[in-house]
Image (spheres, helix red, strand yellow):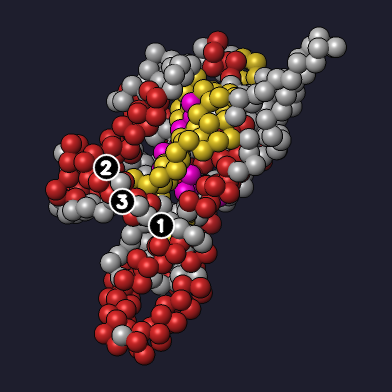
């Protein structure tokens, strides 16, 4: 639904200027490009991104091709194999040191190495198996668009987000748990809801990048009664979004190239999505561009400092990583439940976020981790226990950064208009964000 408020905020994804409404499309006032509206959902991809991927290239052709890609993908979330060289060097030096000082300590570290190695081999073969059987494989965020097209062309039914977990459970007789995150989904949105409510003035325009089926709004009330714009690359998710939030706006677009004007959004959040972007830095730059001065942005993403196993050396490196993140592995394999595919996946460190936000005219309000290791069967469905556990781990120095997710809350600095008493006019202040073509 394109209300007057939405019309004020949306823009051509290429030149970021006004769009005017035609019968079944939107058209840019400057580049004259036409953007279709299908099923009430405007498709606002910049011209350059639409034909970048040949869907045929997404198919896994042979097993050796799959093995090559898997090998290229690194650590499989295990935390040991294919770490940066600095990791192995530090491991080696520590073992050598311990051999002379504490023989049993060296044995303990070596034992940890072999346990990890076995775990990695097992995980790798499971992932490879899924990868080979998968008809489609994705490599970057841009591929989603091509995959949607491919499904449509071949008349295949693509599972939706909400029924994917159900389908997988049925297929494995209830034993499959890959669709569940470490943190129950609702806890993630409760965290966003808390930040949303912390603002002194209720945000007028709320944008969800990677909006999924719009559950932030219909289930948690974020942006309810306000202008809530859900942005996603996946058409099917947005069709679900429209059914569940008929009064709100769904836009099919690339989160790294937002079809929104500068300085128009009060609250933007991006939950568990940034890790799939080809270029996360540019995406964060884009999020800050569309925020109003004084507006808030919230990002939840996987944490590169998280405890992946109980290998003593791994835990030592986590402490080191708080001072330098060069020892961390940040590229892992991720099973994408939405497209039944294995994708590249970035983990972010505290230093990554500090680097991204610095020099962007924004201020970090919160940077912490959430979702600590805990037996799942104990906390599932028990919010009180979950919160108490989060508070407990969150209060321990250093350890508080080792949760499974990182949470970043940022405020875009308000403009400081400089009044020129002679000219009796207020010059337009800048906030350090240069316009960048995507
Ligand atoms: Zn344009």
Q: Gap between marks 1 and 3, in whole Å?
A: 15 Å
Q: Residue furthest right?
A: 422
Q: Which residue is mark 1?
A: 305
Mark 1 C-beta to ligand 1 under 8 Å: no
- For mark 1, give the secondary structure: loop
The reply, left or right, for residue 20 in relation to residue 105 is: right
- Percent from the top left, x then y, of residue 70? 44, 67
- Residue 258, by quadrant, is top right
Circle 2 Cα neighbour tier, 10 Å, few/some/many (<14 / 14–19 / ≥20): few
- Is 275 within the magenta? yes
Q: Are marks 1 and 2 in contact (CB under 8 Å)?
A: no
Circle 3 Cα neighbour tier, 10 Å, few/some/many (<14 / 14–19 / ≥20): few
Q: Nearer the viewer, residue 414 or 266?
A: 414
Dot placed on the residue nearer the N-terminal end, 1 or 3? 1
- Is 207 within the magenta? no
| Segment colored magenta | 267-279
- Residue in the picture at 65% in, 24% down: 415
Q: Which residue is mark 2?
A: 391
Q: Which residue is mark 3?
A: 396
């Amino acid at each position: 639904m394109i209300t007057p408020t939405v019309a004020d905020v949306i823009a051509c994804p290429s030149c970021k200027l006004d769009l005017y409404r035609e019968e079944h499309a939107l058209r840019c006032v400057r580049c004259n490009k036409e953007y279709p509206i299908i099923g009430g959902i405007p498709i606002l991809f910049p011209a350059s991104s639409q034909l970048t991927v040949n869907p045929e290239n997404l198919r896994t052709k042979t097993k050796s091709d799959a093995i090559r890609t898997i090998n290229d993908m690194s650590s499989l979330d295990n935390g040991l194999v294919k770490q940066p060289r600095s990791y192995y060097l530090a491991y080696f030096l520590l073992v050598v040191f311990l051999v002379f000082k504490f023989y049993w300590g060296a044995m303990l570290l070596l034992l940890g190495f072999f346990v990890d190695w076995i775990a990695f081999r097992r995980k790798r073969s499971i992932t490879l198996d899924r990868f080979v059987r998968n008809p489609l494989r994705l490599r970057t965020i841009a591929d989603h668009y091509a995959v949607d097209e491919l499904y449509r062309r071949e008349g295949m039914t693509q599972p939706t987000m909400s029924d994917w977990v159900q389908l997988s459970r049925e297929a494995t007789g209830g034993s499959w748990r890959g669709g569940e995150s470490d943190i129950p989904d609702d806890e993630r949105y409760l965290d966003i809801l808390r930040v949303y409510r912390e603002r002194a003035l209720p945000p007028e325009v709320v944008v969800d990048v990677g909006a999924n089926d719009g559950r932030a709004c219909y289930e948690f009330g974020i942006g309810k009664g306000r202008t809530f714009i859900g942005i996603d690359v996946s058409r099917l998710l947005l069709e679900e979004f429209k059914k569940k939030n008929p009064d709100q706006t769904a836009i099919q677009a690339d989160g790294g190239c937002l079809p929104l004007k500068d300085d128009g959004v009060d609250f933007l959040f991006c939950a568990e999505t940034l890790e799939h972007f080809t270029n996360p830095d540019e995406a964060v730059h884009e999020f800050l561009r569309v925020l109003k001065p004084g507006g808030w942005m919230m990002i939840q993403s996987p944490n590169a400092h998280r405890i992946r196993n109980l290998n003593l050396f791994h835990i030592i490196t986590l402490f080191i990583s708080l001072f330098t993140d060069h020892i961390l592995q940040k590229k892992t394999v991720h099973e994408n439940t939405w497209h039944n595919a294995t994708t590249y996946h970035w983990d972010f460190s505290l230093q990554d976020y500090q680097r991204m936000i610095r020099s962007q005219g924004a201020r970090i309000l919160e940077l912490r981790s959430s979702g600590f290791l805990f037996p799942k069967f104990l906390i599932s469905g028990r919010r009180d226990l979950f919160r108490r556990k989060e508070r407990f781990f969150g209060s321990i120095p250093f350890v508080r950064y080792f949760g499974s997710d990182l949470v970043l809350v940022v405020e875009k600095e308000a403009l400081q208009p400089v009044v020129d008493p002679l000219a009796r006019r207020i010059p337009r202040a800048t906030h350090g964000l240069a316009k960048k073509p995507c």
